[in-house]
Image (spheres, helix red, strand yellow):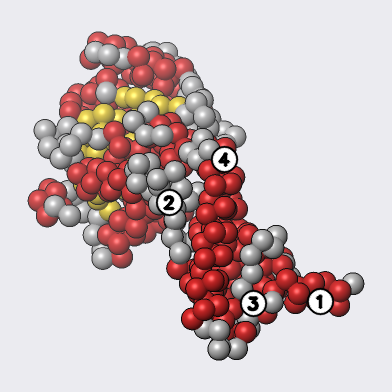
Amino acid sequence: MNKDFHQCLPSQNMAPATAAGQYLGYSLQQTLLATRLRQAVAGSACSLEVLDDVAEQAVDGTTHLVQSKSALTDNPVADRAVSLWKTLYNWLELVKLKLVDPDTTTFEIYVSRTVTGDIVELFRKAASDTDATHALTAARDLLWGTVPNRPLKPAISAALQKYANPVLEADESLVIPIIRNFRLTCSDSGSPISDFEKLIAGDPVSKQYVPFIVNNLLGWVKKQVDLSIEKGLPAVILKDDFHREYLAVRRKIDKESILTSFAPKPTTDDIHEHLGDTFIQQLELIDEDYDEKLDAVSDLLMAGWDRVLWSQSGEVHESSFDELDESLCKAWKNQKKINDLVYAARPALEQGKLLYYECKKHRLTVQQMSPPEHFIPGCFHLLADVPLIGWHPHFVKLLSKTEKDVA
């Protein structure tokens, strides 16, 4: 982390309306931080719960503040919404404390669904000081009533008075720049994660890799924030660090070199459901332990998912899996012949174990791409489940006997 940036940032106690210790409950903010980092200019620093929910500070002195609102039912930017005026009040306090320069700061409210209000629309459209002055006057008229009596002012709630009145009564030289630089962003998708995925999908990456990239970047951002807060530091991430991580993730999924697994990790229930399957019986014939069986179920389920997902995405043609199965059967057959010659004097159980371990080490590419570590062992288990292959020298006879015993 760049030490100079920490020195120029305010302490968390100085900035109003921050709650760094509670950030874990604000998944929206964490996603917005990742989005801001993707959009930020090179050399900038982005933070969580330091100046605002999310903030970007660029090397040219400009600042972008983002106040997030997860509006599931209510409208957080309605004319009389306390949340709207509390946000404006907090921004005004930052300006008063000279923690931000209102002339070089963008003041953004992000809402996770489409909402609007008369006042925020006036503020959003204000492109000049004159527009901002008219918008401020209109806001006073809407909340307080018209001059000279302002008949509505005494009737507004105490909670609204606490935040709205100080803003509307403040020195206009402080408020006008805030209004002029105000932004309202509403999510079209209703999901900040979907918005982030759309942003990443706009980069030159294959569509099927977008969820993988998003999950990795969100996890990386969370880890960086966690580490900073654990050390008592402001949760600040440099754009350049984020960009390096982004490039590293993209290199990891380079389609010309590796296949990336998108298979979900099997649950305990998923694994237990398959402990009676044929491929597990094959492991029992060579006396494999319980942990090996659990690994085998996990490998088989994930390999099965990978085959489906890669085929659906077009990453691997379905015919390539038939070719892979043929290659694996040939590899098993050749290894069995070698073992029959080398280990003929060994007990059948040991011969089966040796064959199984040799096949587990076997590696093949799929359309010239290297699959993840679990894939080839999982495909061997898929074949053993049919069973086209087996480990014990007499697996066909023994499995047949087991079926008869069960019947």
Residue 393 is marked as 3
Q: Earlier in the sequence, mark 1 or mark 4?
A: 4
Residue placed under numbered mark 4 in the picture: 319
Residue placed under numbered mark 1 in the picture: 401
Q: Residue at x 55, y 84 (%)?
A: 344
Q: CA distance from mark 4 to mark 3?
A: 30 Å
Helix, strand or loop at label 2? It is loop
Q: Quadrant of the C terminus?
A: bottom right
Amino acid type assigned to the residue bearing label 1 in the image: Lys
Q: CA distance from mark 1 to mark 4?
A: 34 Å
Q: Earlier in the sequence, mark 4 or mark 3?
A: 4
Measured as percent of width and height from the top left, residue 377 is found at: 52, 63
Q: Nearer the viewer, residue 215 or 134?
A: 215
Q: CA distance from mark 4 to mark 2?
A: 14 Å
Q: Earlier in the sequence, mark 4 or mark 2?
A: 4
Q: CA distance from mark 2 to mark 3?
A: 28 Å
Amino acid type assigned to the residue bearing label 3 in the image: Pro
Q: Earlier in the sequence, mark 1 or mark 2?
A: 2
Q: Nearer the viewer, residue 203 or 6?
A: 203
Location of residue 378 by image quarter: bottom right
Disc 2 and disc 3 in contact, CB within 8 angstroms: no
Measured as percent of width and height from the top left, residue 334 is found at: 52, 66
Measured as percent of width and height from the top left, residue 266 is found at: 59, 60
Location of residue 332 by image quarter: bottom right
Disc 4 and disc 2 in contact, CB within 8 angstroms: no
Q: CA distance from mark 3 to mark 1?
A: 14 Å
Q: Nearer the viewer, mark 4 or mark 3?
A: 3
Helix, strand or loop at label 1? It is helix
Q: Earlier in the sequence, mark 2 or mark 3?
A: 2
Residue placed under numbered mark 2 in the picture: 365
Q: Residue at x 63, y 60 (%)?
A: 383
Q: Is residue 270 above or below residue 203?
A: below
